């Protein structure tokens, strides 16, 4: 085990840089999750209809396997399972990822949200760029006016 | 006899009283280290610099990389 593995498991660190915000600090922990084997029928009743509409698909061991969104669920056949409609192997970042740099990359690439997972693939949460920018004190509207 | 251990094993060993040593350079230790770790940079590791270790307890040594 190295220091990076410890940090990537969302465990605390000490030192001069320990107080800098990371992906873990901004990630929303309360996210909708489902099993890859779940039927999609009825899912939209539980998903947020405004904005943050993610469903993170996990396997039976709690490992992130995929991601889907409300609009995809709504457009899919009633008899489908999560595994059949999900985005397989979504992009994830580690909990110890420096937040400011991550937000910069997300903005340049037009990414609104990203899954935060530990080194072994366990879900920490979902980071939404607008919330992360607020945490960092970034005025997103000022950037967009430039 | 040294052996590789994972994060959960490290946590268990620390709760059982193991000693934790960060062998990264002093500057890197100052920036970030595991709670409770002491710093003995690898290049300075000798019988003298490790003299304070309790030989009756396990010692966990770590550096930067993922295992």
Image (cartoon, rainbow, N blue to C red):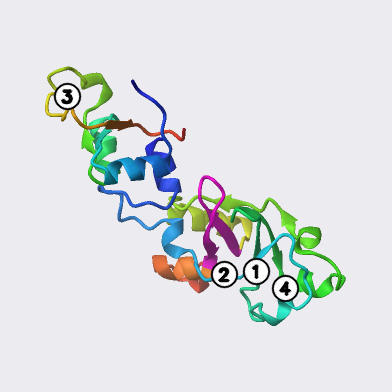
Q: To which residue does mark 2 refer?
A: A31
**Residue A113 belongs to magenta span:** yes
Give the residue at x 18% y 29%: B56
Location of residue B25 (image quadrant): top left
- Real-space Cα separation, disc 2 to disc 1, in angstroms: 7 Å
Q: Main secondary structure of the magenta part?
A: strand
* Chain to which the residue tagged by mark 4 belongs: A
Give A114 or A142, whichever is nearer the viewer.
Answer: A114
Q: Write down the region rendered in magenta.
A: A112-129
Residue A3 seen in this snapshot: yes
Residue neighbourhood size for the residue with mark 2, other residues' Cα within 10 Å, grouped as few (<14), some (14–19), many (≥20): some
**Residue A78 belongs to magenta span:** no
Above or below A117: residue A38 = below
At mark 4, the secondary structure is helix
Give the residue at x 25% y 48%: A16
Above or below B67: residue B36 = below
- Real-space Cα separation, disc 2 to disc 4, in angstroms: 13 Å
The answer to which of marks 2 and 1 sits earlier in the sequence is 2
Q: To which residue does mark 3 refer?
A: B50
Q: To which residue does mark 1 refer?
A: A54
- Real-space Cα separation, disc 3 to disc 2, in angstroms: 46 Å
Give A103 or A29, whichever is nearer the viewer.
Answer: A29
Q: To which residue does mark 4 refer?
A: A70
Give the residue at x 45% y 47%: A8
- Real-space Cα separation, disc 4 to disc 1, in angstroms: 7 Å
Marks 3 and 2 share the same chain: no
Closer mark to the observer between disc 2 and disc 1: 2
The answer to which of marks 4 and 1 sits earlier in the sequence is 1
At mark 1, the secondary structure is strand
* Chain to which the residue tagged by mark 3 belongs: B
């Amino acid at each position: 085990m190295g220091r990076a593995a410890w940090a990537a498991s969302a465990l605390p660190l000490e030192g001069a840089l320990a107080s800098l915000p990371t992906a873990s600090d901004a990630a929303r922990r309360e996210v909708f999750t489902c099993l890859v084997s779940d039927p999609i029928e009825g899912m939209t009743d539980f998903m947020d209809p405004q904005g943050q509409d993610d469903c993170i698909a996990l396997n039976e061991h709690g490992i992130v396997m995929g991601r889907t969104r409300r609009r995809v669920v709504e457009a899919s056949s009633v008899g489908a399972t999560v595994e059949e409609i999900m985005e397989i192997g979504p992009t994830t970042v580690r909990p110890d990822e420096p937040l400011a740099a991550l937000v910069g990359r997300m903005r340049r690439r037009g990414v609104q949200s990203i899954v935060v997972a530990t080194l072994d693939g366990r879900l920490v949460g979902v980071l939404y760029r607008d919330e992360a920018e607020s945490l960092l004190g970034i005025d997103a509207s000022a950037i967009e006016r430039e | 006899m040294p052996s590789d251990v994972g994060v959960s094993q490290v946590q268990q060993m620390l709760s059982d009283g193991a000693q934790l040593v960060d062998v990264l350079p002093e500057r890197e230790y100052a920036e970030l280290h595991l709670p409770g770790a002491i710093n003995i940079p690898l290049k300075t590791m000798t019988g003298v610099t490790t003299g304070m270790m309790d030989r009756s307890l396990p010692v966990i040594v770590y550096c930067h990389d993922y295992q």
